Image: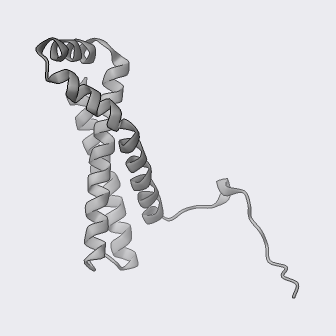
Amino acid sequence: MIKKRPKNLDLTTVRQPIPAISSILHRITGVVLFIAMPILLWMLQKSFDSAGYAELHAMFTESFLWQFILWAILTSVVYHVFAGVRHLLMDMGIGETLKGGRVSAWSVIILSAISAVLLGVWVW
């Protein structure tokens, strides 16, 4: 059997629907949080000592890099939580339609973008 189907191997020309993008970002933020876990545990361990807490405070008020890392971790947490709630609602049968999936995906992205801006204001 000869199949003469077109093959599109250029992934830059494939346009993903917004629910797929939202789901992929949910997975990416999960990986970011997994990678950030040692940093968070280190910060928690440092905060138990008053000298370590002062060192962390100085580090986060003086270093743009550490402020950016903190902002990135917090933004990942917020997006992951919003997208996780979206997935849980879909597991319960809420928003399973095509329109519901699009609306919930856009809602997650918009709420996360607003939260990222607010977190940026808070961190900086």
Q: Dividing the picture into quarters, in which one does residue 96 lie?
A: bottom left
Which image quarter is the C terminus in?
top left
Residue 114 point in image, percent of width and height: 27, 44
The image quadrant where one finds the N terminus is bottom right
Q: Quadrant of residue 62?
A: top left
Residue in the picture at 19% in, 15% down: 52
Q: Is residue 114 visible?
A: yes
Q: Position of residue 67 (x, y in %)?
A: 31, 23
Q: Where 37 sits versus 53, above or below?
A: below
Which of these two is toward me, 31 or 87?
Answer: 31
Q: Compared to 32, does 84 lie above or below?
A: below
Q: What residue do we see at 37% from left, 71% from top? A: 101
| In this rendering, position of residue 12 left or right of residue 98 | right
Q: Is residue 1 left or right of residue 22?
A: right
The image shows residue 71, relative to residue 85, as above or below, that is: above
Task: Please name whichever residue, 53 or 115, is drawn nearer the observer in this view of the structure.
Answer: 53
- The furthest residue to the right: 2
The residue at the point 42 percent across, 60 percent down is 23
Q: Residue at x 25, y 62 (%)?
A: 85
Where in the figure is residue 76, as x and y percent of width and height?
Answer: 33, 43
Which of 105/34 is in front?
34
Query: Farthest residue in the left direction?
Result: 50
Q: Is residue 43 left or right of residue 3?
A: left
Which residue occupies the extreme bottom position in the image?
1
Image location (x, y in percent) of residue 10: 72, 57
Residue 72 appearing in the image: no
| Position above or below: 58 against 32 | above
